[in-house]
Image (cartoon, rainbow, N blue to C red):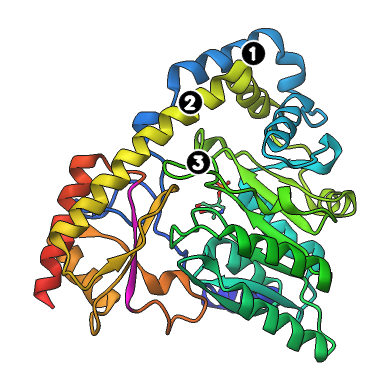
Amino acid sequence: MTATTDRLESLFASRVREVVPPLFGAAGEPVRPLISLAYGLADPDLFPRAELMAAAAEVLAYEAADSLNYALSYPGLTDQIVERLRAEGVAAQPEHVVVGYGSGQILALLPEIFVEPGDTVIIEAPSFLGAVRRFVQSGARLISIPVDDQGMDVALLSDTLRKLAAGGRRPKFIYTIPTFHNPTGVTLSLERRRQLVALAAEYGVPVVEDDAYIDLRFAGEPLPSLAALDQEGWVIRVGTYSKILAPGLRIGWVHARREIIDRLLMVKAEGTTGPFITRVVARFCENGRLERHIAMLRQHYAAKCAAMAAAIRQHFPAEASFVMPAGGFFIWVKLPQGVSARALLEAARARGAEFLAGTACFVDRAQGEHAMRLAFSFQSISRIEEAIAIIGAAFADL
Ligand SMILES: Cc1ncc(COP(=O)(O)O)c(C=O)c1O
């Protein structure tokens, strides 16, 4: 047994030699009856089960031959993605879209087409480590740009790009979540959006715009996406149906210049994404149904976010601060001086609730020690209030 283990270990490629534990525990049954605010799961009560059943039945009734066979990618869903992008002001083209198994798949393929070990990739700090870890595996050298209340610090990015250019280094891409950022919930200001797109063109560095939450706005006016501001094709826009329909469908997409799409298709080894499931999603979304569904989601998530914010104000120490998000799934709380997120998490777990410690959102785990991410997406309002009260009590245990 051990001999086999040893002999196997020496076979693995260097990028996976050291086993990194999964970022998030398996979503599902918690070991103890904990109320978890740790994960950005969708609210299962909001899944349109009956309509999805009807859509699946229709696909089986009318399109079984194509949907159950090896088939070319389904143009109907691509057309809908293009239509939504055009409504957002992007000059989108169907041949510039690839549909994947979740935006996670697309984000994992991007380093495969861009990164050689030692290349530079720019990310935000904090960020969505699910994607960032793939960049690390590709051997990229990461440079982190901090996020403040207005999103990525684009002035610092500008300095960084200038210094890199002076040293003859051009990053392979910049990864950003400009709208309802994961984990901080903040949105990149319009001014910074313009600057970021201009910097991308000036330095010739693609910007990967991961706008997973863009449609879940429940306050304020929409801002143009980076892709909508981009005149020269430096923005690689990545999107998903996970947050607006159901993550379990595993449908995401990318819109980018054809040169990039061609390369993505070369490394997307399994070929077409789900001929069956893409048709089910497209049928569900027809005739304005997706937009009506999103409007319903916005209302529900807005109410949950408001309930969580009110509970935080009631139960957390006054020095715990947060920026009220205008959409998305998360509230990011900065903890009072001296309070460690990991210690608080331990105390909260002992009392029956959990959150994501800020450290889980930074590549450099020395950061985020005084912050927590609270997901309001999954639990009911009453459970959110209960969990926040529990975490509030855990502050007193420290
Ligand atoms: C910012 C961001 N991008 C991408 C994803 C991945 O989404 P999916 O692979 O389900 O499309 C998530 C999921 O949590 C996310 O928060």
Q: Nearer the viewer, mark 3 or mark 1?
A: 3
The region drawn magenta spans 370-376
| Mark closest to the chain's N terminus, 3 or 1 | 1
Query: Which label number is shown at residue 243?
Result: 3
CA neighbours of label 3 inside 10 A, class few (<14), some (14 to 19), many (20+): many
- Which disc, if any, is residue 96? none
Q: Is mark 3 within 8 Å of ligand 1?
A: yes
Tell me where residue 248 appears, x and y as whole percent.
51, 38
Determine which quarter of the picture holds residue 130.
Answer: bottom right
Name the amino acid type tagged 2. Answer: His
N-term mark: 3 or 2 = 3
On screen, residue 342 versus residue 8, left or right, reads left
Identify the element where label 2 is drawn.
helix
Q: Is residue 245 visible?
A: yes
Is the residue 178 above or below the residue 140 in the image? Answer: above
* Residue at the spot of label 1: 60
Q: CA distance from mark 3 to mark 1?
A: 25 Å
> In the displayed structure, does residue 7 sit left or right of residue 336?
right
The verdict on residue 168 being magenta is no
Rendered residue at 77%/19% (across/down): 66
Q: Which residue is mark 2?
A: 293
Can residue 375 be found in the magenta stretch?
yes
Q: Could you tell me if the residues under marks 3 and 2 are in contact, i.e. CB atoms within 8 Å?
A: no
Cα distance in 3D space between marks 3 and 2? 11 Å
The answer to whether 334 is drawn above or below residue 191 in the figure is below
Q: Amino acid at mark 1?
A: Leu
Label 1 SS:
helix
Residue closer to the observer: 263 or 87: 87
On screen, residue 195 above or below 85: below
Q: Between disc 1 and disc 2, whose residue precedes? A: 1
Q: Position of residue 109 (x, y in %)?
A: 73, 57
Label 3 sits on what residue type?
A: Lys
